[in-house]
Image (cartoon, helix red, strand yellow):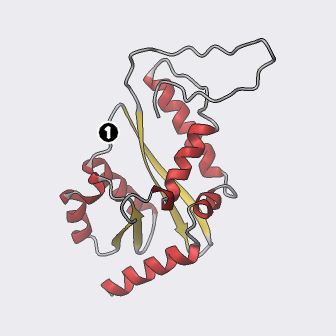
Amino acid sequence: MLMAPLVRRPWNPRGHTPILYQKTCSHKKVSVISALCIVPCRNRLRLYCRLHPDAHIDSEAVVAFLTCLRKELAGHIVVVWDRFQPHRSKKVQKLLATKPNLHFRYFPPYAPELNPVEYVWAHLKINPRANRTAMELDSLATATRGNMRSLQKKQPLLPSFLKKSGLSFRFIWDIGSAALNKWA
């Protein structure tokens, strides 16, 4: 999430042009790493995320996120993600080698439309964050955290991201089963 607003057409009375104030020449941002997880026993989705104010997502951030995710989720975890460089780094591969209950699968190259988390970002940018400005990094991080927590509680909305990607619970489950059978 950037400090500059994503400008969308607002609903204003005719003749009252909205004015959006922003801090110019600010390249500060809040990077977010997240996972949309299927909880098989309940047939539900959960959204996990971690914010990194004014930082890029690197391999150390990915390893830390996966370590926290392993503490939250019991049993085997199958991670299906894009081919972002930190996802394929040596540190992440080392973590994969040392943790037998952690399995990775990758989306095809150049296929962001298959990644349900991309639709989470699109929803956040277009709905709660549209036309919103932040003058300080702390306020941007607080607003992003609040938007993510609000989205985590919207259980009927989370499956729509999976549906929009064209993937189904069954497809993800089959990928997970194939990964688990390979290492069994």
From the viewer's side, name the closer residue of 129 and 62.
129
Q: Quadrant of residue 110?
A: bottom left
From the viewer's side, name the closer residue of 37 and 75.
37
Above or below, 132 relative to 58:
above
Taking 155 as reference, is 40 left or right? Answer: left
Residue at disc 1, secondary structure: loop
Q: At 60% from the left edge and 45% from the top edge, which residue is drawn?
A: 123
Q: Quadrant of residue 74?
A: bottom left
The quadrant of the rendering that contains the C terminus is bottom left
Q: At 70% from the left edge and 58% from the top edge, which residue is drawn?
A: 156
Figure label count: 1
Identify which amino acid the numbered label 1 is placed on: His
From the viewer's side, name the closer residue of 131 and 9.
9
**Classed neighbour count for the residue bearing mark 1: other residues with Cα under 10 Å, few (<14), some (14–19), many (≥20):** few
Residue 94, position in %: x, y? 20, 64
Residue 104, position in %: x, y? 34, 69
Above or below, 4 relative to 151:
above
Q: At 58% from the left edge and 41% from the top edge, which residue is drawn?
A: 124
Taking 32 as reference, is 6 left or right? Answer: right
Above or below, 139 relative to 76:
above
Above or below, 59 relative to 173:
above
Check disc 1 and report the residue beneath it: 56
Taking 160 as reference, is 135 left or right? Answer: left
Residue 39, position in %: x, y? 55, 69
Q: Quadrant of residue 107?
A: bottom left
Residue 152, position in %: x, y? 59, 51
